[in-house]
Image (spheres, grey):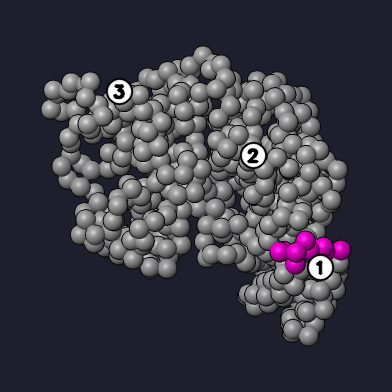
Amino acid sequence: MEMSANSKSLTITSSDLTRRELLTVTAVTTGGALIGGQLMPGVISPATAQSAGAATAPLNVVLRVNGTEHRLALDARTTLLDALREHLHLTGSKKGCGLGQCGACTVLMDGKRVKSCLSLAALVEGREITTIEGLAQGEQLHPLQTAFIERDAFQCGYCTSGQIMAGVSCIAECHAGSPQDIRDWMSGNLCRCGAYDHIVAAIQDAARATGSVRGG
Amino acid sequence: MHPFILDRPRDLSAALAFRAQAGRNDAPAEYIAGGTDMVQLLQENVRRPERLVSLAGLLDNRIEVGSQGLRFGAAATMAEVAAHAGVIEQFPVISEALLNSASPQVRNQATMGGNLLQRSRCPYFRDVGYSACNKREPGSGCAAIGGENRWHAVLGTSENCIAANASDVAVALVALDAAVEVRAAGTQRTVPLIDFYRLPGATPHIETVLEPGEVIAAITMPVNPAARRSHYLKVRDRASFEFAVVSAAVALEMDGTRIRQARIALGGVGTKPWRVPRVEAALAGANLDLATLRPAAALAAEGAQGRGHNDFKIELMQRAIVRAVQTAGGRA
């Protein structure tokens, strides 16, 4: 990614700087917290975003994510989603509404799908969290990831990781027996591009591939 | 989000010692369990507690169905209760109400106790951009009366608040005489669910009879011969993941083609889950034809008051009763 003209005072040589790190740095160096904040609300730390009021002492929180244990010191207000994205830098889980309505933040907790924006991170200690980053086995994509690619089940891609995590559960729960069944049990995930037909088809494909087509 | 101290007590007695005020929005301390409603309200600054006391892992979550009836711990999730074989077989209205609620993700997170304590979906309550909301800010007025009130209640309202209770499963539970076991430090009491909720009156910010420090520990329901033949009809603006415009929970005990006993409660129309005893009485001994059902259902409208946009609910709830009774009556 090219450097923005506005960040001329900044010299970055590292070739492995991520797009996300670059956006963060750019937003800061342009004095453009506002600009950066508007473009990418997610890059502002929760502490900054929540600003006002004296913060209480951070809580020690141990999170188990994708099989690895992480020790974090978190503001009590930190949601599981913000802990994943801002502290563990697992940015596959997306922040859409932050209010449990869109499903872009869907992860698995002890194998069950949940909305990570509705859980406080400090209250899910001891639970096994699986994010989209933990779905593939090495280079081997999960069958539903493959099906999403084959069925072109996304346009902008913002809802995709949440759709896939919810879809994995939908199949595991045996609620992928018919398009109607899938639509009902995937209703917690919104797609503003309207890729629903392709998403349903991808879930049907993956359900057949994994032999879990029993209706619910 | 307003800053708060988050307490993670080791056991329930430690949690109860904090004397939180569950169900009230002017409290300095509140409980949090599944968090699905609380975190939304925190995010939107509708609730601003100084202290949150976690009940995660501290409350019973067992589900028991037996000859005494039904009992589940308050920490049982909506998904667990909905999928329980005994609930599906003996109390289908409960499973149906739950499966028609929220989304699969939220049902995995939300507890039954928290479901009963979820706050209203009144958009004026949920949006602090509106200054007038007696439920959020006592004495500030009601923006819904005279405002956009398509979603609001027509039964049990007051001049101070017309917000509808949002729970689906509470409607099913009220229809079948459920009660809640309420615990505080050193005390325990049982309250019929229908009496657990308060009418808004002059204090719409106080929604339940919970006293400071009390939590819902369990939900119980007696055996009822009508429970097996029960049904939850939810009328809403889209097919899934939406709150009720109108809903009806119906349980019938049949004697051949005649109704021996009917239990009916309504959702989406009341400031609390709304039982309709006059309709139930009119249906005792009745058959399932429309000429009988319609005048009985019309009794539900007694005392109903529309506020403009929600006038249609008064007719719709009668039709919902008729449809739900026919569906339940048609079941084996």
Quarter occupied by the C terminus of chain A: bottom left
Crowdedness near tag 2: few (<14), some (14–19) or many (≥20) residues, C-alpha within 10 Å: some
Chain letter for mark 3, please. Answer: A
The residue carrying pointer 3 sits among few (fewer than 14), some (14 to 19) or many (20 or more) residues within 10 Å by Cα, namely: some
Answer left or right for B53 relative to A129: right
- Name the residue nearer the viewer: A127 or B239: B239
Q: Residue at x 29, y 56 (%)?
A: A154
Percent x, y for residue B259? 77, 75
Residue drawn at x 61%, y 26% is B52
Question: Most extreme residue toward the top, as rendered?
Answer: A57
Give the mark toward the camera: 2 or 3. 3
Determine if marks 2 and 3 fall on one subunit: no
Q: Which label is found at residue A29?
A: 3
Q: Residue A214 lies in what quarter of the image?
A: bottom left
The subunit carrying tag 2 is B
Say whether marks 1 and 2 touch (CB < 8 Å): no
Viewer-proximal residue among B75 and B242: B242
Residue identifier under label 2: B128
Tags 1 and 2 both on a single chain: yes
Q: Is residue B145 above or below residue A13?
A: below
Callout 1: chain: B
